[in-house]
Amino acid sequence: MFLRSLPRAVYRPLLRSFTTHATRPRTRLNTLTCNALARSLSTTPVRRDLTNILADENPPPVQVNSISEDGILLADGLLLPSSCIFFDGQVFLWDVPQKLWEGWSPERFEFFEATLNRPEILVLGTGRTSVQPPPFIRSYFNTLGIQLEVMDTRNACSTYNMLSEEGRRVAAALLPISSQAWHKVKSLSPKNI
């Protein structure tokens, strides 16, 4: 199998040296053949392209490019100024209370209960610093069968990018670096259209 992965000009002479015929005794690779093989392999042109060997051929549809006080900038140029959830190649805006963990309840995470294919890992970004959630949030995700990883939002974005490139079923629930109010817009009714 190893020989088949080599260039044809290299493996054919080696293959001949391994064959046995009734008239010719079986021979082994000698030092000259090994040296010739090493020289031919060292002259083979080497590609210098860098690729992520863990990533799929198609990059994940949602990737974070950078994060700043203005919000989370995605690789496609979209800037998200408020809390958001990344899951299954989509971005969802996430309405959460202004103060971290005050007024939070499992209803803030009902999104993950409603999905058919739940993520195996949820990366929770808690803003500028890493702040552990109340125990009921961890137990809630344990009952759903989702592993919860809590970290600051910068590291959460990096972790999300890496896990999604590996092809893992990962979701991210991210709070912005600087707290920003949620701006709800009234939808147009069919009468106004």
Image (cartoon, rainbow, N blue to C red):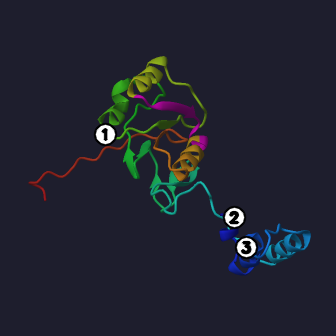
Count residues near mark 2 (Cα–Cα under 10 Å), then give few for <14, some for 14-19, many for 20+: few
Picture residue at 46% right of the left edge, 41% below the top: 180
Q: Residue 2, labelled with which disc? A: 2
Q: Position of residue 87 (x, y in %)?
A: 41, 46
| Sequence-first disc among 3 and 2 | 2
- C-beta proximity under 8 Å, tags 3 and 2: no
Query: Regarding mark 2 in the picture, which secondary structure is present there?
Result: loop
Tell me if residue 81 is in the magenta stretch: no
Picture residue at 51% right of the left edge, 49% below the top: 164
Q: Position of residue 54 (x, y in %)?
A: 59, 54
Q: Is residue 137 visible?
A: yes
Q: Amino acid at mark 2?
A: Phe
Q: Amino acid at mark 3?
A: Ala
The residue at which mark 1 appears reads as: 116
Q: Is residue 45 visible?
A: no
Query: Regarding mark 3 in the picture, which secondary structure is present there?
Result: loop
Q: Amino acid at mark 1?
A: Leu
Q: Quadrant of the N terminus?
A: bottom right
- Name the mark nearer the viewer: 3 or 2: 3
The residue at which mark 3 appears reads as: 22
| Sequence-first disc among 1 and 3 | 3
Residue 9 position (above or below residue 33):
below
Residue 136 position (above or below residue 58):
above
**Residue at mark 2 to residue at mark 1: CA–CA distance:** 44 Å
Picture residue at 55% right of the left edge, 37% below the top: 127
Residue 30 position (above or below residue 174):
below
Q: Which residues are magenta?
A: 145-155
Residue 122 position (above or below residue 77):
above
Q: Residue 21, labelled with which disc? A: none
Name the residue nearer the viewer: 167 or 7. 7
